[in-house]
Amino acid sequence: MVSEQLNRGLRNVYLDRTESSFIDGEQGILLYRGYNIHDLAAQSSFEEVCYLLIHGNLPTQEELGAFDKRLRRQRAIAPEVVETIRLNQKAHPMDVLRTGVSSLATHDPDTDDMSKEANVRKSERLTAQVATVVAAHERIRKGKEPVAPREELSHAANFLYMLTGAEPSAEAVACMDLDFILHAEHGANASAFAGRVTASTEADMHSAIVSAIATLKGPLHGGAAEAVMKMVLEIGTPDKAKEYVEARQPRIMGFGHRVYKAEDPRARHMREKSRELSARVGKPEWYQILQAVEEAMSRYKRHGIHVNVDFYAGSVYYLLGIPEDLFVPIFAIGRVPGWCTEILEQYDNNMLIRPLLRYTGPMDLEYVPMGQRQG
Amino acid sequence: MVSEQLNRGLRNVYLDRTESSFIDGEQGILLYRGYNIHDLAAQSSFEEVCYLLIHGNLPTQEELGAFDKRLRRQRAIAPEVVETIRLNQKAHPMDVLRTGVSSLATHDPDTDDMSKEANVRKSERLTAQVATVVAAHERIRKGKEPVAPREELSHAANFLYMLTGAEPSAEAVACMDLDFILHAEHGANASAFAGRVTASTEADMHSAIVSAIATLKGPLHGGAAEAVMKMVLEIGTPDKAKEYVEARQPRIMGFGHRVYKAEDPRARHMREKSRELSARVGKPEWYQILQAVEEAMSRYKRHGIHVNVDFYAGSVYYLLGIPEDLFVPIFAIGRVPGWCTEILEQYDNNMLIRPLLRYTGPMDLEYVPMGQRQG
C-alpha cells in the first residue's frame, strides 16, 4: 500500500532485516553479530572482527590463521592500479581511493562472478587491498615510491608501514587496530546503504563498494574527524575552549549523531587512546582542549546531543602524524568489511531498491516549437 | 514516528518531492518537467532536453545555442583520463566508464566547488564528457586511437563519430538522438537514487554520478536491452518466437516494469525505430521476431505486464552495429542529465539519507577468548 507521506532522509523507515549489527541509539549500545563493541574493543583484533563480520561467527584459532593468511597474501595491488593512482594523484585522497578501487575491478579474477563464494572472496580481497590503495597514493603524492606490503605484519601495522616506510611503534599499531575495529560496521548508514542500493540491481561487489566510498566522502558522513581536528587547532589552548563553544553551540563538530541519542559507545575507547597518546607524545593540551569542549557541551546531553566517535578519532590520527585528508580514507579502510557484510546480506535476499518521488511541478505543458517561443 | 513495518525495496515509499519528471505507471504517462515524452520525442533534440532538465525550462533559440556551444566545447577529456581508460581497458565497459568518470574528477576545475553554479557547470560538463569516455574506451580496446570530438556535430552524431571514426548516417543520428531523449530522466530509479544517497552526505557531483553509474551496471537495472538482443538471436526466426515464450513465460526480458503497469510510453518510439531500421538494413526478421514475442506475451497485459523501452532499444542498438556490451554505457550517456537533475534537487533541499535496519540476530553473545573457544 502506498502511503502519501514523505519520508525525507528515510529517517524512520525500516529498509530490511539485518544480522550484521545491532544499534540501540537510546541506550548507546552497539553489537557486531551479537558481540558487544566494548568486548571486541578490549579483547579482539581487526582481523578477527573482519572474520566475524564477513563469515558470521568468531573464528577458531585455525580459521583465524587461515583467514589472516589470505588477507596478508592479497594485499598487493596490480601495477596498473598503481599507475591509475599515479595518473590521478592530484585529486582528493577519497577521489583517488574511489578511482583506485574502481580500477581494482579490472584486475580481480572474480569481478563478475556473482556466486556467494566469489563475493566472500572479494570481500576478503577488498578488505586487504583498500589499505594498500590509500598508502600507495600517499607515497606517490609525496614524490616517493609505494612501499610493498609486508606479510609478517598485522593489517594495522602493515598499513602504517606502507604509509611511512618505517615499522610503526606497538602503541601506534594498537591505536590503528582499535580504530579499525570501532569503524568496521554500523548498519545502514549512508555509505553502506548506497552500497546496498547498487547491489540491489545485482551490480557486482566492486561497483557497490565504489558507491559506498563515493558516499563516505561527504562531510555529513565521513568528514567529522577532520573537522574536529581543525577545531582543536583553531581553539589552540584549553582555556579558549569554553568561549569557542559558547559562540557556536550547539553546532560543534563531533557532537550529535543521527542514530545515537546517548553517548556513542565507540567514543570512550577513542577518548582513552587520545588521552594516552597526547600525554605520550608530549601534547597533553590536545586532550585537555577536547575535554574542555566536551565539558562546555555537557548541557546538551539532556537534548540527546552527546560526543560521537569522530570527536576523539581525529585527535588520535593527528597525534599519530597522519595527514588530515587521510582521515576519511582511514575510516574507509576500517569500514570495508562492514560494507561487504551489508552487501552480502543484500545479495542473499535481494529486492531492487527504488523509492518513489512525489511530483510537484507543472502538468501537461504545451510544447511550443522553437520558432514560436517567446524570448 | 517509527513504523515497525519493513519497506523492502522501498517499493511504496515516497522519498521526497520532485519537479524533474512525472511518471504515471497506471496510465503509462511520462513528463519531463511538465512536457509529455511524446512531444519531446517527436519535436525536440537531446540537447534541448538536457537544457530543459538541467535548467528547468525550454530554452530560447539563443539560450539553446549558448548551451549547445558549451556542451560541444567541453567534450574533450584530459590525456590522463585517456591513459586511465587505457590501463583499465580490459574491464567491462561499465567498469571502465565508472573508473573513467571517477578520473574526470581529478581534472575538473570545479570538482569540490559545491555552489549551485558550479554544480550546474559540472552537470553540463559531465553530459558532454561521458560520451567521450565511452567512445575512447571502445577505440582503445579495439587497438585503435581515440577519435577527437568534432565541434560541428550534434551530441548524438559526435558520439557515433567518435565510436567509429566515420560520419554517421542521418538515420543513425536520429535513432541515437531519440534514444538519448527517451532515456534522459526517470525519477528515483535505482541509479538516480544511489546518486541522491551519495549527494545527501554533501559528497560532490562526480562522486554521486560515479555511484549512479555503478548502480546502472546491474542487470536488474540497465541490462535488459542487452538481454533482449540475446533473446532475439537465440529465437532466430519469427516462427520460433511463440514456442520460446511459451516455455519461459511470463519471465521474458523487456516485459514488465517496477513502475509501469501500462505500456511504457517510451516503448512505442523505439518500436517505430526498430521497425524502420530493420527494414532499411535488410533484416526485417529482427522486427518480426520482436513483434511475435510481443504478440505471444499479450495475454499478460491484463496482469500489468507490458513491453518496456528496453525491449526495442536493444534491437535498435544492434541494427546500428553497436557492440552489445556498450548498450548499458549508451543508456548512461542518455541518463547523465537526468542524474544531474535529481542530484541538483537533492542538494537544493538536502537531508542525509539513512534508513534503519531491524536486527534479527542473536543478542549479547559472550566473547569467549581464543584459548577457551571450542573448535
Image: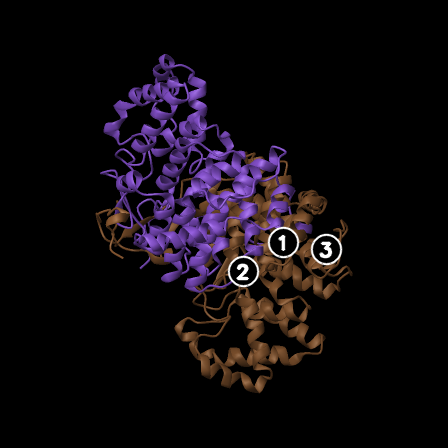
Chain colours: A purple, B brown
Left or right position of B149 against B216: right
The type of residue carrying mark 1 is: Asn
**Mark 3, residues whose alpha carbon is within 10 Å: few (<14), some, or many (≥20)?**
many
User: Which residue is at a point 43% across and 26% down the rendered structure image?
Assistant: A319
Determine whether the residue tagged by mark 3 lies in a helix, strand or loop: helix
- Distance between mark 2 and mark 1 Cα atoms: 14 Å
Where does the image place residue A261, in percent across and percent down from the top left?
A: 27, 35
Same chain for the residues under marks 2 and 1 in the image: no
Q: Please tell me which residue lies in front, B116 or B82.
A: B82
Residue labelled with disc 1? B88
Q: Secondary structure at mark 2?
A: loop
Residue where numbered disc 2 is placed: A109
Does the rendering let one see residue B57? no
Q: Look at mark 3 in the image and give the residue it sits on.
A: B158
Q: For marks 2 and 1, give the one nearer the viewer.
A: 2
Q: Residue furthest top?
A: A239
Amino acid type, label 3: Asn
Q: Quadrant of the N terminus of chain B?
A: top left
Residue A334: give x, y in percent of width and height: 41, 42
- Residue B10 is tagged as none
- Seen at 45% across and 53% down, the residue is A70
Label 1 secondary element: loop
In the image, what residue type sits under mark 2? Pro
Q: CA distance from mark 3 to mark 1?
A: 24 Å
Q: Position of residue B304 (x, y in %)?
A: 41, 71
Of marks 3 and 1, the one in the foreground:
1
